[in-house]
Image (cartoon, rainbow, N blue to C red):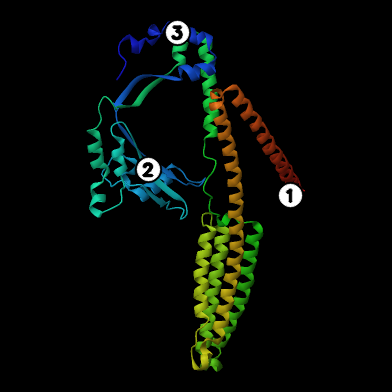
Amino acid sequence: ITTRGSFRTHPQDHLTEDFKTSVKDLSVEDIESRIGVFYAIKLQLGGMVKRTYVMEATEEDNESKITAELQSAFGKECLGASLDATASFESGRGSSNKVAKVRHEWRAQGGQTDLWFKVGATGAEEQSEVSTATDIAREWAKTIDSTNEYPFDFELRPVWELIQCVDKDKAREFKSYLEDKWEKDGNRHMPSIFFPTKLRIVQLPEASKTFILNTCRAHEVALVEQSAHAQRHLDNPIHFIDRKRYKRLRESADSGMEEVLEIRDIVCNDLDMKVEELIETLECQSQRRFLESRRYLGMWGNDSKNSNKVQKLNKAVLDKIIKRLNIDLNRHEAVEDWHNDLDECQHEVYEAMEWFGDNLDCMESEEKRQNITRAVEQVKDIQGALAGFLTRLENELEGVDT
């Protein structure tokens, strides 16, 4: 359906007297609620199907990363018009975060929408193969007629263009009012609660970085001494009979030095590595050191006695670093939970304010008075609690600054 002729090119010529009177008499708020914000010059009638994807994301996620993760979870057709893939209500996890969840759902309007309940129906294997989105779409399309058509794909124009033909000042006021409201609403509904960003090595407290680096340096000094001790014995022909023992000692010391040098390099230079990834790597290395510290080589285990001691020291250093990283990781997650609680509290307050604005006029006078009185007491309680909390935070901040 589309407008034609003068109704499309000169819609102001078709304004009714009621519209002109309403524009002059009503406030911009009343014009918005009673007349509307846009008018349609073109629309489609028929049926519409939407697939909606909901994904937990971190503040660092961007469009390309989320697109890639959705395609990984649901196939390359998930963002296109193709309905060749089997449709189902699913939940999965984002590839960049093993805990973040992602789900999708179908929504149909127009025709016999109950047919879409077959999407993802569980049961026999052959039933799930038949219940594809393509099959359902063909069956559903046949049910659309003039009694159940759904309007969609609107081409809209702002109502202030029509108001301008009646009252230019009111049109400017109405346009300014709406643009200010949209800007505020847009900022209010921007995502504020994100899935916690995983702590990176570069974000570790300086005290933790210093602790790890000092631990690595101290161990490196000890290993250099052990390696030099082993080399002196290897260079001395008198100790030929113990050559295997000191060769293993040197190898254990040298591999331990390579390990701590690698850890130092990660702490100082790696900008992307997550703390969880480093912990996982060090835990594997610690387990390997444990197994190597239990070797029993040569007569009465003589060839592995010294190297076993070094491997135990290597493992002890790794475990010490792992313990410190776990402390920082758990602290970071606890702080993220705390900030998420504050964001959620703020979001719920915004929702309560929005509900109040939308529904206040629907109440009778006595009901309105009772609800407003109750809300005033609740807001005062919240305000008192937040004032005390804010004072405490400011006092803590002053203590940190001094």
Check disc 3 and give the amino acid type.
Answer: Asp
In this view, the residue farthest toward the front is 366
Mark 2 lies on residue: 105
- Looking at the rendered image, the disc whose residue lies closer to the viewer, 1 or 2, is 2
Real-space Cα separation, disc 3 to disc 2, in angstroms: 43 Å
Q: Nearer the viewer, residue 353 or 300?
A: 353
Mark 1 lies on residue: 400
User: In the picture provided, is 383 more to the left or to the right than 108?
Assistant: right
User: In the picture provided, is 108 more to the left or to the right than 33?
Assistant: left
Q: Is residue 100 above or below residue 49?
A: below
Looking at the image, do the residues carrying marks 3 and 2 touch, with CB atoms under 8 Å apart? no
User: In the picture provided, is 1 more to the left or to the right than 33?
Assistant: left
Q: Position of residue 167 (x, y in %)?
A: 50, 8
Q: Quadrant of residue 165?
A: top left
Q: Residues within 10 Å of mark 2 (few under 14, many from 20)?
A: some
Q: Position of residue 5 (x, y in %)?
A: 30, 10
Q: Nearer the viewer, residue 308 or 252?
A: 308
Real-space Cα separation, disc 3 to disc 1, in angstroms: 65 Å
Q: Nearer the viewer, residue 356 or 386?
A: 356
| Chain-order first, disc 3 or disc 1 | 3
Q: Quadrant of residue 267?
A: bottom right
- Looking at the rendered image, the disc whose residue lies closer to the viewer, 3 or 1, is 3
Instruction: Look at 46% across and 16% down and name the residue there.
Output: 35
Q: Position of residue 235 (x, y in %)?
A: 54, 87
**The N terminus: image quadrant:** top left
Mark 3 lies on residue: 18
